[in-house]
Amino acid sequence: MPLHRRTSKALEVLPLIPAIPASVSPARPPRPARLALAAGTAVLGIALTACSGSVAASGRADAGQGGDSGPSKAARTSISVNPHGTAAAAGKPVTVTLAAGKLREVTVSAAEGKALTGRISADGRTWTSDRAAAPGTAYRVEARDTGGGSDTASFTTAAAAKVNKLALAPGKNTTVGIAQPLSIVFDNPVKDRAAVEKALKVSTSNNTEGSWGWLRDYSGRDRVDWRPKEYWKSGTRITLDAQLNGVDSGPSGGFFVRDYATTFTVGASQVVKVDLDRHRLALRRDGRTVMDVPMSAGTPGGDKASWRGTAVLMAKEGTINMRSETVGLGHTYDKMVDYSMRLTWSGMYAHAAPWNTAYFGRANHSSGCVGMSDADAASLYRQAHVGDPFEITGADAKGTVAEGNGYGAWNVSWSDWQAKSALA
């Protein structure tokens, strides 16, 4: 690209020509000096020029400079940029280096999107971006030095050969229960988990302590959840700023080509207590019991038993068709079920089960779900929030809710959960 030279009004650019005695008349003007290109970088120009003394508009040095009334010699300098070219590699920070002098300001802006922020080194010679260059993006570089000189350049990164995407929960601007984690499921494998986790910025309105933890989602895909050490406090506002554009998730995963963000708020402090042995379900709000009803859970002793531990209400799905073959129980049932509240990906729900009335409060006799009367299920459905914890206790269970089977992270100790962070 053409190299341009600009200076402030206070600084006159002097030609890079050796001084010639007045008595000598050259036959032809000397050729301008050429700058050597730094290996692996692109030179922006020779425009950043400093003089041996301050220069007036006439081109002569100020008085007191050794009696030399002629123009002073200019010191050549240049800036190099990495990456460079029209198909540059993405995924690494942009660096702008000054050959001589000190940088004052550097701007690296994308044709579409935000500018890259960065920092100038202690010696003033190098500027480094805080984030990596994104794939398939055109960038413009503008640099100024402390002497008033400036220059520009541009480069374009190659498009990503493979793109990784993700799904975020909970949804933006939602209100959730006190056990709802931030959960991210990735389309492709994430091998460089540390790089991805560093790009995920969580902030809360009350400085809640929490940690990311990597796990395998029930779908088999890579997933990372951020959960607090203890249940959220009611009223907490949580924001995720996932600065992933330009981050490489590793082999077979590909680049992320955009940023993601979500914000949600924690609602009322509610816990649903399910006692498998007593066959009772209670809803407690702010420590006070507001509902206590009989129920019947999964038949113990086999695959129809319910899970124990803490499950989190994932979704209120209303009236849905439940078929036994979808959960590996053959063709034992095919029903339209009302007030369905999903607790796990494996198919455990709380819902209305009027066909099981004889067992409410007496025995566990379902295919794994927590069943109630129509009236009780309707009341719970109306009051429950997505993100409410269902704390399930009792001996009549087939095991504990796994961390990837819905939101089972609450069944992992805090120290073990912290150890699941890629940055631990």
Image (tube, rainbow, N blue to C red):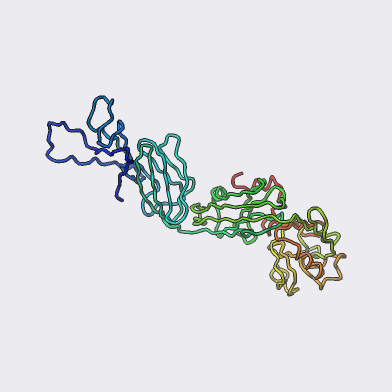
Instruction: Count every numbered label the image shows and give the total.
Output: 0
Percent x, y of residue 60: 25, 33
Position of residue 183 relative to residue 104, above or below, is: below
User: Looking at the figure, which quarter contains the C terminus?
Assistant: top right
**Residue drawn at 14 percent across, 41 percent down:** 28
Camera-side residue: 404 or 116? 116
Position of residue 293 relative to residue 48, above or below, is: below
Percent x, y of residue 290: 82, 59
Res 17 quadrant in image: top left
Position of residue 104 relative to residue 259, above or below, is: above
Q: Is residue 406 left or right of residue 281?
A: left
Camera-side residue: 6 or 391? 6
Q: Is residue 274 left or right of residue 242?
A: right
Percent x, y of residue 190: 55, 54
Percent x, y of residue 416: 68, 46
Camera-side residue: 331 or 424? 424
Camera-side residue: 246 or 39? 246
Position of residue 287 relative to residue 301, above or below, is: above
Res 332 quadrant in image: bottom right
Q: Is residue 134 left or right of residue 359?
A: left
